[in-house]
Amino acid sequence: MDLLGGKNLNVVNNKNFFSTNEKYNFREVLEEVQSFISNKYSSLLRDSEDKSIQIKLYIKQFLISKKIEVGNLSQDELVNKLYRDMAEYSFLTEYLNRDDIEEININAWNDIKILYSNGEVKPSDEIFISSDHAVDVVRRLLRKSNMILDNSNPTVRGHLSKNIRITVLGRGVIDDDRGVVASIRIVNPKKLGKDDFIKNETGSSEMIESIEQFFKYGVSMCITGSTNSGKTTLMAWLLTTISDDKRIFTIENDTREFDLVKKDKDGKIINNVIHTVTRHSEDKNKNIDQEKLLEMALTSNPDYICVGEMKGSESFSSQEAARTGHTVITTTHANSCDATYSRMVTLCKTKYDMEDKTLYELVTEAFPIVVFIKRLEDNSRKIMEIKECIIHENGKREKQTLFKYEITSSQKINGKTQITGEFKKVNNISKQLQKRLLENGMPINDLNKLVR
């Protein structure tokens, strides 16, 4: 087989463009190689995962025949870089495979910011070659969820794996010269645990231990905060603390981010987990939303229910589930513990137009613990407050702060914000909550540690 296609080696302009040992621009080389492979071996690109060695061989032979060199790249480095840009996800491939990155934000083809697990935000080491190149790479990403980005569908949400989700805005809703805008979110890439939260100073050891014990012994809670504050990461860890004999039922919207299934060395599943995701359909009878999955959860004998996020009518069903004895954990968007209950009331009203006072009484009974987490200006994540809502015998509600993070100073040093503060225990949990924890099996010694 004539791998290089005979006389017309340059399939773009039919002239011998690469004829000496000159060093060429990577963009020019990519266009030539991509055009060559697309014309001669397009089927390989459609099945690139299984044919990567073969494609790289063809690329290498093309480069040798044309005597092509690019910058200081060795031949193998150039082959790998060309393959990465043609069949994988360009420079995004490396970022997606790292465990110290939480988010990749594409603001334009030449403006990509990386959010690291330590809270730092830095520009990417590379950018796309052009706006069209950015669009091409993002379309490849979306194929994993069988979604299409085009003029008729310029807004897309999908997933790349169980813990990576992508939101994309294309031409038609953004300026054409930006190419594409995208947010690629990687949930808990390092599988953070209790020691990590303490080491990263997300919360004090006493705070982290308390919320772990609350959840373990059957107290429903809501983790609240803004986007990218760390809500889901904290919730994902709490779900891993549940003993293997307890049944966990998770409900997520559109894409699955949790992966709680545990296996022993022989591949046998040792815990008890059901993962579910919503399925949207134009046919209302076939649409499966979080509310529908909650109904299914309640008939599946769960010990713990996780509702990934409350943002609609499922909020009413969530509080109903929590008030019927199930342990429910969820997240929502709010800017304080106090605002969380108001937010829940608003969300519940999307299901039933009940009086605010009635709904407030329901949600405070359902979720006695609220954890507020925030990403500060220095990019650190802090549990700012943990509150308990105490219900007195006369029905009066009293919101009491258990823990808080108190900022003592904030200053700019060399252009960077530096924040210092301290975690404080403010109050012990109420007598009512102590009783509930004991009834749910907490050893008295563990309870004494919480209330000392």
Image (spheres, rainbow, N blue to C red):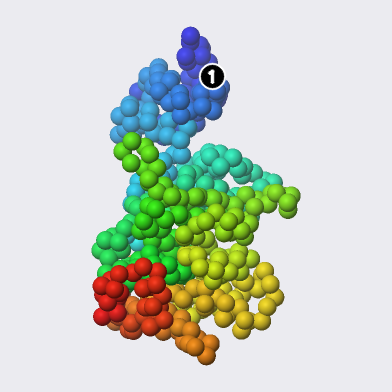
x, y percent for residue 84: 42, 34
Please give the name of the residue rendered at 57% of the width and 59% of the height, measured from the top-left corner: 298
User: Label 1 neighbourhood size at 10 Å, few (<14), some (14-19), many (20+)?
Assistant: some
User: Which residue is rendered at x = 35% and y = 46% of the image?
Assistant: 98
Residue 335: % across, % down: 48, 75
Q: Quadrant of residue 77?
A: top left
Q: Amino acid at mark 1?
A: Lys
Which image quadrant: the C terminus? bottom left
Q: Outermost residue toward the bottom?
A: 394
Residue drawn at (38%, 28%) of the image: 79
Judge from the rendering whether residue 198 lies leftward or rightward of residue 174; answer left or right.
left
**Extreme residue toward the top, this view:** 1
Compared with 173, 80 (above or below) is above
Q: Quadrant of residue 238?
A: bottom left
User: In terms of depth relative to the viewer, which is nearer, 288 or 35?
Assistant: 288
The residue lying at 31 percent from left, 38 percent from top is 265
Please count the marks in the image: 1
| Up-down relation of residue 308 to residue 4 (above or below) | below
Residue 143 falls in which quadrant of the image? top right
- Examine the rendered structure and indicate whether residue 324 appears above or below residue 31: below
Determine if residue 115 is in view: no
Say which residue label 1 marks: 40
| Nearest the eye: 210 or 342 | 210
Regarding residue 399, the answer to whether it shows in the image is: yes
207 vs 86, left or right, is: left
Residue 295 on image: x %, y %: 61, 58
Residues 299 and 68: in front is 299
Question: Where in the figure is residue 325, as x and y percent of width and height?
Answer: 51, 68
Badge 1 marks a residue whose secondary structure is helix
Taking depth in this image into account, of 286 and 43 the one nearest to the observer is 286
